[in-house]
Image: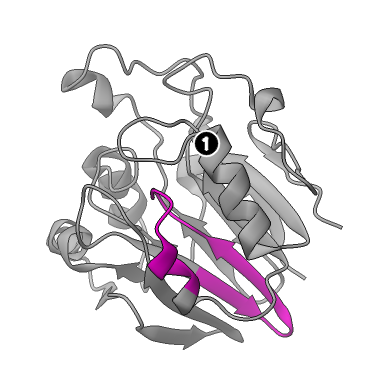
Amino acid sequence: MLKVSWLGQAGLLFENSAVTILVDPYFTDSVVKVNPANWRRRPADERWFDIRPDVLICTHDHLDHTDPETLRRLLNQQTGVTVLAPLNAWETVRQFGHGHNYVQFNRHTQWTQNGVTFTAVKAEHSDPTAIGVLIQEGDRVYYITGDTLYNTEIFDDLPGHIDVVFLPINGAGNNMNMADAARFADRVGADRTVPLHFGLFDTLDPADFVCKNRVIPVYNREIPLN
């Protein structure tokens, strides 16, 4: 079973003995340069730059998900990383070179590595190439919606059973608000629902997100999913 930790905003770290997966890392304060209101409320842990991912996923081409300042440090000091990114984000990340495998990971694309299968699914966001991602390890399925609004077409891309869904609740920047995120989670019907995208650029209280099987993540900690 994968151990999952929350690294703030939409950043997630999945680990087992065979694979390390890093999703949407944002370890700098680069967004404040283009939007002063979005200054970082919580400092990044410098040790995050020591993560050695086998697979790095960027779900879309926005700075808090595909951050050149973060990616440059991660990718310049490593070799052999598989980077999965949809078209717009792929155009950004592949510029870092260094011999990594930059895979254009558009909707309905699959990639299997280290016993884990990744599937890109629909997301409804202001980056039209944005995706969500299914991560399947054995019989266990983790669904990261990515930044998205509630769109009924998304459900056509999803399997019959999902163990854990991770979804935004901030209701800004073309993301679901708490009410729609709760409806979305109820329709997905996952065993566990983990809210994301709060507390870094805002003062949202995730306790206000009312949802069955909710697990509120703690910054820079493993998420208890058992």
Which of 131 and 8 lies nearest the eye of the viewer? Answer: 131
**Disc 1 target residue:** 169
Q: Position of residue 182 (x, y in %)?
A: 62, 44
Residue 50 forms part of the magenta stretch: no
Residue 81 visible to an observer of this rendering: no
Reply yes or no: does residue 144 show up in magenta: yes
Does the image show residue 147? yes
Q: Is residue 10 left or right of residue 26?
A: right
Reply above or below: 220 against 181: above
Viewer-nearest residue: 202 or 31: 202
- Report the front residue among 73 and 15: 15
Note whether 86 is above or below 43 in the view shown.
below
Task: Count all numbered tags in the image, as a single digit.
Answer: 1
Residue 29 picture location, percent across and down: 32, 24
Percent position of residue 152, x then y: 43, 63
Residue range highlighted in magenta: 134-155
Q: Nearer the viewer, residue 147 or 16?
A: 147
> In what quadrant of the picture does the N terminus appear?
bottom right
Residues packed near mark 1 inside 10 Å, few (<14), some (14 to 19) or many (20 plus): many
The x, y position of residue 108, in whole percent, is: 36, 82
- Residue at image point 53% right, 76% down: 158
Q: Quadrant of residue 161?
A: bottom right
The residue under label 1 is which amino acid type? Ile
**Mark 1 falls on what kind of element?**
loop
